[in-house]
Image: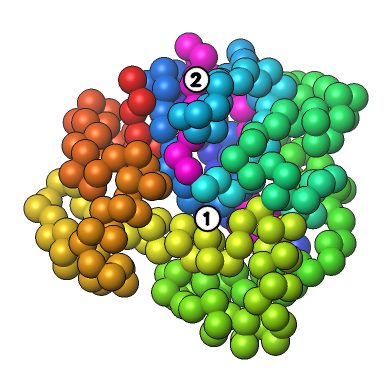
Amino acid sequence: MEYVSRVPRPPLDGLIDDLYYLEGASPYARLTLPPAPSALLIVNLGAPFRVRAGTDIETAEYADGCVVTMPTRAWEFGYPRRTRSVGVHFKPWGLAPFLPMPAAELCDRPVTLEQVWGPPAVAELRDRLATAGGPHEMLMLLEEELRRRLCETAGLGLVRQTSRVIAATGGAVTIGDLRVAAGVSSTHLAQRFKELVGVTPKRLARTYRFTATVFAINPAEPIDWGELAGAAGYFDQAHFGHEFRAFTGLTPTQYVEVRQRFLHEHPGHVLDSWPLPAD
């Protein structure tokens, strides 16, 4: 699989982690993605792909692409035999200036790119990308489109600054401390977060803490789960296990077994850092 990534120029770099190009055969037909403090936009240039936003939701097919605000639970991505797309990994607040609706309306409800930007605009963008000279030119075209669509968004500064505090602490910060630092009420802060991120500050903090914990796991070495849970700030190992199941549907031990399977079957693969085999 070919994966090309670049960080956009200011001011988009304050909203986006990276723009990427992906092409090739997926290591597995279906991959499970645990929740992460990130939103996603995909412009599809190949065969349709499928997304299932939770075990209680039916799988949906996407031909033009899709938009996923920050999820609260694991979701499943079904690849065609070969995939080709460009996309954007947004910071938790970064998608809001490009949405015509509050982010909360899309929480755990991925929508097509056409529903967000309209069929004519998406068709034109896909045509331009499909005829571009290569991945780097495609990412430049996508960046130009995002720059053109960038809008002023009320409350974005407040949400961005508060989110950065949450990120800097790995989610180990109280809502009371966030409220005091922001200088607004907890209710106002929660409302702004739901509008622009899709979830409350408390939920974002939980996601940052879980993500930091997962990246601290080395599946190739023995793991002291009690030490790992304590270092991450979980009350006890039972609390840690509950959070793990809530975010992934797996126990910590099961998660490591699945990670080990990926590393064994596809060592060094470009997708081996976060997605899990769902097959």
Residue 22 visible to the viewer? yes
Left of 265 or right of it: where is 142? right
Mark nearer the viewer, 1 or 2: 1
Q: Position of residue 195 (x, y in %)?
A: 74, 57
Asked if the stretch drawn in magenta spans residue 134, the answer is no
Q: Secondary structure at mark 2?
A: loop
Front residue of 171 and 29: 171
Q: Secondary structure at mark 1?
A: loop
Of labels 1 and 2, earlier in sequence is: 1
Q: How far is the residue under mark 1 from the one under mark 2?
A: 23 Å
Cβ–Cβ below 8 Å for labels 1 and 2?
Answer: no
What residue is shown at x 34% (from left), y 28% (from top)? Answer: 277
**The N terminus sits in image quarter:** top left
The kind of residue tagged 1 is Pro
Q: Residues within 10 Å of mark 2 (few under 14, many from 20)?
A: many
The kind of residue tagged 2 is Tyr
Asked if the stretch drawn in magenta spans residue 82, the answer is yes
Note whether 180 is above or below 44 in the view shown: below
Front residue of 190 and 9: 190
Q: Position of residue 119 (x, y in %)?
A: 86, 24
Note whether 186 is above or below 270 in the view shown: below
Over which residues does the magenta segment extend?
73-95
* Residue tagged 2: 79
* Residue tagged 1: 37
Q: Position of residue 158 (x, y in %)?
A: 72, 74
Specify the label residue 71 is tagged with.
Answer: none
Q: Quadrant of residue 273?
A: top left
Note whether 80 is above or below 166 in the view shown: above
Q: Position of residue 203 (x, y in %)?
A: 52, 60
